């Protein structure tokens, strides 16, 4: 700190030469003149450093000691600024540079997002821009609490949002909302129907009445487990039909099924043939404001590849300035046809058909799979014939506006009617 203050106020380094330099030190001590630094060069020369403003006083004391002052060197900020006393353009540039460093350090140049997993950085930064914070925003003018509240109201995916501004860097810390459990529908009357044809190998009704048994064949759309349950009561409790009630049918139904999937591919595939025509365009983005260095903004060719390269100035590691250079290249091409290897095409179609079959099945396994390959001209067709053991039950709501009600005992209903008749007969 002492050296910095000395540089800020300016210093004078000089040699005191004489027959007895000790007399100079004694005179300085009696006068209270303080030397910042003192070094003996030889028995007749003493190097001293004093503040630049006390140069005249140094000469006066040296004269009293019969010594002379040689090699005076001025250093520090005042000496540096004196070099610009007749160079007005350089002085103006220095002032503008200092002002830019002082004022520019209060603008937000980079925005960092942490804590997000499913919500992308671009979504959060875009919403933050709508809330008034982006590259080029005046940092001291940001109402942090208001921005945080607006972010929470605008993005339902977040449960926590914190904005911190550190000079030219804005940091956004978020916490995402955890999805709640999916509630199972138990109040809508529904049936379990067959999603495809098959032969039932196992049926397990959890709620509702099973309409088929193991070994029976079913067609697509047949009701496997009915949501209209027949009330079954003991004869000692209720005589006659107890009626039915609607439930949300559930259960597990396994069946042997046959699946047939077909895929085709043209063996003459379109490919790109580049014509050699290339067009390039340039643009500069400063603090989110784009400047185009071209006139026509349309695509120059009917068919072309568009390659965009972005270059950002990064003077420090992981610290990007909001200055981005964009180069867009357009490469023109025409479409031609090229033959496709039939063996590779067949292998690809078989793999795609197997992926589609695994996606169609809800639960189960593939028992056997056979492929049939046909070629008509330039069209290759592959058919997959598979036998599977899979879950074929699908829950389908009934066509009714009623809701599932809990079972009501006929005996309790009879007791209520008897109590009602007794009240009516009483005076």
Image: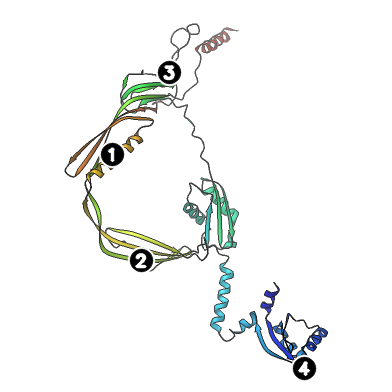
Describe residue 305's horizontal placement relative to residue 209 as left or right. Answer: left
Alpha carbon distance from label 3 to label 1: 45 Å
Above or below, 266 relative to 331 = above
Q: Is residue 186 above or below residue 58?
A: above
User: In the image, which is nearer the foreground, mark 4 or mark 1?
Assistant: 4
Most distant residue in the front direction: 43
Marking on residue 229: 3
Q: Secondary structure at mark 4?
A: loop
Residue that mark 4 sits on: 66
User: Which residue is tagged 2?
Assistant: 281
- In space, the residues marked 2 and 3 are separated at their CA atoms by 72 Å
Could you give the CA–CA distance between mark 1 and mark 2, rounded to whole angstroms?
44 Å
For the residues labelled 2 and 4, the Cα–Cα distance comes to 77 Å
Kindly indicate whether the residue at mark 3 contacts the one at mark 4 (C-beta within 8 angstroms): no
Q: Visible in this render: residue 132?
A: no
User: Which x, y percent locates residue 261?
Assistant: 27, 35
Q: Nearer the viewer, residue 90 or 132?
A: 90
| Disc 1 versus disc 2: nearer the observer | 1
| C-alpha separation, residue under disc 4 versus residue under disc 1 | 108 Å
64 relative position to 424: left or right: right
Front: mark 2 or 4: 4
Identified at 16% across, 43% down, the residue is 377
| 10 Å crowding of disc 3: few (<14), some (14-19), many (20+) | some
Q: Earlier in the sequence, mark 2 or mark 4?
A: 4
Residue at 58% across, 69% down? 103
**Within-10-Å neighbours for mark 1: few <14, some 14–19, many 20+:** many
Instruction: Quickly name the residue at label 1.
Output: 350
Residue lying at 54% horizontally and 62% vertically, measured from the top left: 108
Q: Earlier in the sequence, mark 4 or mark 3?
A: 4
């Amino acid at each position: 700190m002492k050296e910095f203050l000395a540089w800020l106020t300016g210093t004078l380094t000089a040699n005191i030469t004489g027959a007895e330099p000790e007399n100079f030190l004694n005179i300085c001590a009696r006068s209270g003149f303080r030397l910042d630094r003192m070094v003996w060069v030889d028995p007749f020369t003493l190097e001293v450093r004093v503040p630049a403003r006390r140069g005249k006083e140094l000469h006066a004391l040296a004269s009293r000691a019969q010594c002379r002052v040689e090699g005076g060197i001025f250093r520090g900020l005042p000496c540096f600024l004196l070099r610009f006393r007749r160079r007005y353009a350089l002085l103006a540039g220095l002032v503008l540079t200092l002002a830019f460093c002082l004022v520019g350090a209060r603008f937000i140049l980079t925005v960092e997002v942490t804590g997000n997993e499913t919500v992308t950085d671009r979504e959060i930064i875009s919403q933050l821009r709508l809330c008034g914070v982006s590259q080029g925003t005046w940092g001291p003018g940001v109402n942090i609490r208001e921005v945080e509240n607006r972010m929470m109201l605008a993005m339902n995916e977040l449960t926590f949002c914190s904005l911190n501004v550190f000079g030219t860097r804005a940091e956004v810390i978020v916490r995402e909302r955890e999805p709640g459990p999916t509630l199972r529908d138990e109040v809508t009357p529904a049936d379990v129907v067959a999603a495809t044809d098959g032969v039932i190998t196992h049926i397990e009704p959890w709620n509702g009445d099973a309409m088929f048994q193991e070994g029976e064949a079913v067609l697509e759309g047949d009701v496997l487990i009915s949501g209209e349950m027949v009330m079954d009561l003991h004869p000692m409790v209720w005589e006659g039909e107890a009626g039915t009630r609607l439930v949300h049918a559930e259960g597990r139904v396994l069946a042997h099924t046959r699946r047939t999937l077909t895929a085709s591919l043209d063996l003459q595939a379109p490919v790109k043939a580049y014509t050699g025509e290339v067009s390039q365009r340039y643009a500069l983005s400063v603090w989110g404001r784009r400047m185009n260095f071209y006139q026509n903004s349309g695509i120059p060719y009917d068919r072309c590849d568009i390659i965009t390269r972005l270059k950002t100035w990064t003077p420090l590691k992981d610290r990007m300035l909001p200055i981005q250079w964009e180069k867009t290249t357009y490469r023109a091409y025409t479409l031609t046809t090229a033959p496709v290897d039939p063996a590779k095409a067949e292998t690809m179609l078989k793999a795609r058909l197997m992926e589609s079959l695994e996606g169609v099945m809800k639960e189960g396994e593939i028992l056997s799979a056979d492929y049939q390959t046909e070629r008509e001209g330039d069209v290759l067709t592959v058919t997959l014939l598979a036998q599977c053991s899979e879950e074929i039950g699908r829950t389908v709501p009934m066509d009714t506006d009623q809701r599932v009600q809990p079972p009501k005992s006929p005996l309790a209903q009879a007791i209520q009617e008897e109590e009602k008749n007794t009240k009516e007969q009483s005076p």
